[in-house]
Image (cartoon, rainbow, N blue to C red):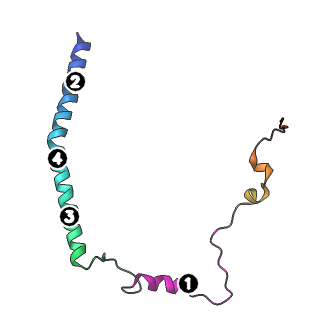
Amino acid sequence: MEFLKIIAIFFLVFYGVKYLFRLLMPYALKKMTERLMQKAQQSQATGGQQQYQYKSGGNPFDQFKQQSRKDEGEIRVDFVPEEDAKARKGTQTAGEFVEFEEIK
């Protein structure tokens, strides 16, 4: 008898949540689309440009230009691979090979 009560409660909760989801989901989607439309209208009103703040003023490329200006001949290494990756080349990393002859 307890098992039947548990099954009945499970189905009531499941279908109750399903029903509430059907009622509330259109409202939530409507609100989400309204917010997206407002953001689109605001960005269109500002000329389609998003408002970002940059350290070096209003131009986003100024920051890149400052980083790319280096003394001539200066070398910058961002990534150094591990020694294991250098040692394993060619057939060592390819796996097992099986020799065969083609018969015509």
* Rendering quarter of residue 83: bottom right
Q: Which residues are magenta?
A: 58-79
Amino acid, disc 2 = Phe
Lower position in the chain sequence, tag 1 or tag 4: 4
Amino acid, disc 4 = Pro
Residue, disc 3: 37
Amino acid, disc 3 = Met
Tell me if mark 1 has few (under 14), some (14-19) or many (20+) residues whose alpha carbon lies within 10 angstroms of its own. Answer: few
Mark 3 vs mark 1, foreground winner is 3
- 99 lies above or below 88: above
Lower position in the chain sequence, tag 3 or tag 4: 4
Residue 10 lies, in percent from the top left, at 24, 24
- 38 lies above or below 66: above
Residue, disc 2: 11
Residue 33 lies, in percent from the top left, at 20, 57
Which image quadrant: the N terminus?
A: top left
Residue at the image position 25 percent from the left and 73 percent from the top:
43
